[in-house]
Image (tube, grey):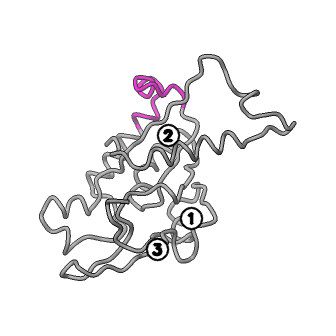
């Protein structure tokens, strides 16, 4: 379930800019207060559990049965529970070098929100939804010929909050959803 690479440079730059711009309440630089010799920043990327679109693709019915923002398959739900049990166990998580998990960042796709839920519950953390972290391709519906595409907004703010009341949503998750792209994006981006 480890993720394929997505724009890691963009993520790294975002994290670095965020930390570099942070200051403490007394005005001192964030790093002066919180840097510890020997401390290591560890970032773990986890791919979502199996989605229903993955099932449709394996069955050769992706183009006719796909969903713009699919649910997890039964196996995907089982994978998400296993992930939560693994990362929620400090001994097992330490095996991967994750001695202490402080934050969970999650893409706003339905399948990723569902995948991280058991981990968030096991760790007692509120996942931070990041609308600029998502799989290339976008959220779209297609016609039967799969040659015409219509962008979809993804889950709306109300839908996300109803399904995941403890998640922290950014302001750009709105009543129209979160995805503002053109629809089916090129893999070249």
Comparing labels 1 and 2, the label whose residue is closer to the camera? 1
In the image, 155: left or right of 73?
right
Q: Is residue 21 left or right of residue 139?
A: right
The residue to which callout 2 is attached is: 122
Q: Residue at x 39, y 43 (%)?
A: 46
Mark 1 and mark 2 lie on one chain; the one further toward the N terminus is 2
Mark nearest the camera among 3 and 1 is 3
Which region of the structure is painted magenta? 85-100
The disc, 3 or 1, on the residue closer to the chain's N-terminal end is: 3
Q: Distance between the residues labelled 2 and 3?
A: 30 Å
Packing grade of label 2 (10 A; few <14, some 14-19, many >=20) is some
Where 7 sits versus 158, above or below? Answer: above
Q: Is residue 152 above or below residue 124?
A: below
Q: Mark 1 highlights which residue?
A: 161
* Circle 2/circle 3 CB separation < 8 Å: no
Quadrant hosting residue 66 = bottom left
Residue beneath label 3, please?
153
Foreground label between 2 and 3: 3
Q: In this image, 28 relative to 145: left or right? A: right
**SS for dot 3:** loop
Q: Where is residue 104 in the image (x, y as percent from the top left)?
A: 53, 44
Query: Gap in Å between the C-alphas at discs 1 and 2?
Result: 19 Å
Please tell me which residue is depicted at 46% across the width and 50% down the height of the picture. Answer: 117
């Amino acid at each position: 379930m480890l993720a394929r690479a997505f724009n890691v440079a963009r993520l790294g730059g975002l994290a670095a800019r965020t930390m570099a711009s942070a200051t403490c309440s007394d005005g001192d630089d964030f790093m002066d207060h919180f840097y510890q010799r020997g401390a290591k920043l560890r970032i773990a990327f986890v791919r979502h559990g199996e989605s229903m679109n993955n099932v449709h693709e394996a069955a050769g019915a992706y183009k006719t049965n796909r969903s713009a923002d699919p649910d997890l398959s039964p196996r995907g739900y089982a994978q998400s529970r296993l992930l939560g049990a693994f990362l929620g166990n400090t001994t097992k998580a330490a095996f991967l070098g994750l001695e202490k998990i402080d934050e969970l960042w999650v893409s706003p796709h339905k399948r990723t929100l569902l995948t991280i839920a058991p981990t968030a519950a096991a760790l007692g953390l509120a996942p931070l939804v990041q609308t600029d972290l998502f799989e290339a391709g976008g959220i779209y519906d297609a016609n039967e010929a799969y040659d015409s595409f219509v962008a979809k907004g993804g889950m709306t703010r109300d839908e996300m909050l109803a399904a995941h009341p403890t998640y922290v949503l950014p302001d750009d998750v709105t009543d129209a959803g979160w995805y503002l792209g053109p629809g089916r994006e090129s893999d070249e981006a």
